[in-house]
Amino acid sequence: MVRVIEEPHPEPSNPSYTSYLEHMTTTLQSETAKYLQELAESLRAEGVAVSWNVKLGNPATVIGELADSKPSTLIAMCSHGRSGQSRWWLGSTTDKVIHAAASAVLVVRTQSQHLQSIGGSGFKSCIAPLDGSVRAEQVLPHVVAWAKAFSLRVNLIRVIPELDSHTLELFPEASSDDRVSQANEYLDAVKVRLLEQGIPDVEVTVERGHPANVLVDLAHNSSESLMIMGTQGLGSSGVYRWTMGSVSQRVAGNSPTPVLVVRTQEEDPADLD
């Protein structure tokens, strides 16, 4: 566990104010250490191995550096869902950590009724959004690992964005029905690969609409699920392309169920042909 306290910015022209900031920072460090120690003791009583730190600095930077210093670290953070115009706001620290950290980030919605209803280890299914790119498929080893560890059903999903009439005139081969058919064929092929890796329960879903909207709605209807997504996907070639990066951030900030965001690497240009 870690709590990062932003360093105060002293004002040389106002020594009294600078002294006040230093005092408040020291007090906050002490109170935070006491809180984390008590929380650690309660977790240890349940058999969990726990360490804790109080750090000064930029929260996103410090969290990323701590995780990067220990390979195979999983970062777990909270999001704060919003509605209306700020619906897709994730939260600056969580958003920056997802952008910068090499480690996977597990984002949990604050005060999620879905999560509270799960209890225990609780997940029953794993939702894996794919966009047809090699980069997006880099999440599949994580999907397999979680599915095997917790006996999860896997739902492979691809969302087909609606295209405007002008785009369809330019690319008549991009009709919705054609893209749905291609998406089903693609997901069926991925399903076979997962079955061959020992995942017995795999289903495929193809939906139309805005990817982030569809995935958040799916999460609302899948209360005991874990969604696993890549930080960015380049999508299929041509007009079918949709950017997984912005979608994963929006879903992570608004999904009522936890979302595991996995750092993915750029594809070789040869893979995009």
Image (tube, rainbow, N blue to C red):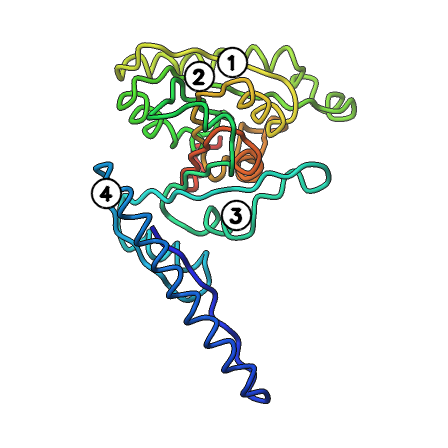
Q: Mark 2 — residue?
A: 155
Give yes or no for contact between labels 4 and 3 (Cβ–Cβ under 8 Å).
Answer: no
Label 1 is placed on what type of residue? Answer: Thr
Label 4 is placed on what type of residue? Answer: Arg
Q: Which mark is residue 95?
A: 3
Give yes or no for contact between labels 2 and 1 (Cβ–Cβ under 8 Å).
Answer: yes
**Where does residue 228 sit, x and y in percent of width and height?**
43, 30
Q: Secondary structure at mark 2?
A: strand
Picture layout, residue 92 above or below residue 208: below
User: Which is closer to the viewer, label 1 or label 3?
Assistant: 3
Picture layout, residue 254 above or below residue 143: below
Residue ID at (47%, 70%)? 7
Of callouts 1 and 3, the N-terminal one = 3
User: Which is closer to the viewer, label 1 or label 4?
Assistant: 4
Question: How far apart, in angstroms, are the residues tagged by discs 1 and 3?
Answer: 28 Å
Residue ID at (44%, 37%)? 261
User: Which is closer to the viewer, label 4 or label 3?
Assistant: 4
Of callouts 2 and 1, the N-terminal one = 2
Quarter location, residue 264: top left
Between 190 and 12, the one lying in front of the other is 12
Q: Which mark is residue 44?
A: 4
Of callouts 1 and 4, the N-terminal one = 4
